[in-house]
Image: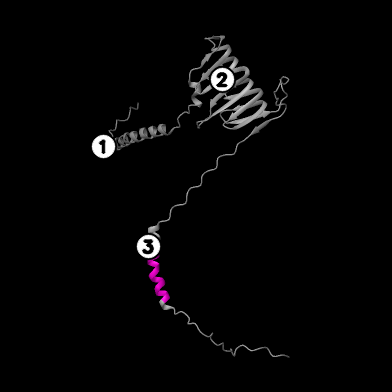
Amino acid sequence: MHGRPPHRSRSPRFAWRIALRLSRRRALLPAVYALACAVTALAPAAHAEKADRDKPIFYQGDTGGANLGSKDGELTGNVVITQGTMTIHADRIVFHQNPDNSLSATAYGNPVTFREKRDDVDEYYEGFAQRAVYDGQQRLLELFDRALLKKNNDEIRSNYISYNAGTEVFKAEGRPDARPSEAGETLLGPRVRGVFQPQPKEEKGTPPKEDKGAQGKDAKEAQPKQEKSAKGTAAPKAGNPLPLKPDDSLSAPSGK
């Protein structure tokens, strides 16, 4: 019958190695913590325009109602809905709060106006149409019938425009007008029109100013050198020109 082998006591050298490893790990903990704090500090902060979905949705109109359970509603008459930097004005709006707190809405008006801040810059883009559909989860705006999309002085006109606020890419289609023109009104027809304004030119930097003190110093240092070189070279005296002597090595070829 075999018994357990006798317990061997660990040598002091082995215990010293374990203690050294533990001390090294403990020494690394402050460095790891400092690195984690630095990474957190360097993480880009959420921009206000992208954080619109984290803001409450305010809505008002002449008449309407909302379902507090499903977070949707319909408003009629001078309707205004805002969430963060986004604002919608319309005659009638059917809206819904998405699970991520973003807003989705279908608006009708003459016209509907939509306005929201652009990403990373202190500028807004604006949309105008007879009908607008906004998907807050995809940040996609669709404009129907006499649509106009503006960014500063740049604009695009068509009977259908879609705009992705995340990528700032728009798409326009020339569709037939949904109704006949009224008196004094020019319809768009199946055409897409737009304009891009000239971009501001960058001002060229002014050339660096020359150091007059350094120039004066260099000129003073160069002046004695010029005087010395002038003394070493004698100026030719005015008078008759030097006579030319024939060179015997050069002779005219003999005729054959």
Instruction: Give the quarter of the image for residue 146.
Output: top right
Count neighbours of disc 3 (C-alpha within 10 A) and say few if under 14, some if 14 to 19, many if 20 or more.
few
Magenta span: 219-230
Disc 3 target residue: 217
- Closer to us: 82 or 170: 82
Q: Position of residue 249 (x, y in %)?
A: 60, 89
Element assignment for label 3? helix
Count neighbours of disc 2 (C-alpha within 10 A) and say few if under 14, some if 14 to 19, many if 20 or more.
many
- The kind of secondary structure the magenta stretch mainly shows is helix
Q: Earlier in the sequence, mark 3 or mark 2?
A: 2
Q: Is residue 37 visible?
A: yes
Q: Which mark is residue 12?
A: 1
Position of the N terminus, as image quadrant, is top left
- Closer to us: 210 or 131: 210
Element assignment for label 1? helix
What is the distance, in whole Å, between disc 3 and disc 1 at their CAs? 77 Å
What is the distance, in whole Å, between disc 1 and disc 2 at their CAs? 77 Å
Disc 2 target residue: 88
Q: Residue at x 65, y 25 (%)?
A: 147
Q: Foreground mark, 1 or 2?
A: 2
Q: Position of residue 237 (x, y in %)?
A: 48, 82
Q: Earlier in the sequence, mark 1 or mark 2?
A: 1
Element assignment for label 2? strand
Q: Amino acid at mark 2?
A: Ile
Q: Earlier in the sequence, mark 3 or mark 1?
A: 1
Considering every residue shown, the one lying at the far front of the view is 239
What is the distance, in whole Å, between disc 3 and disc 2 at their CAs? 70 Å
- Closer to us: 242 or 52: 242
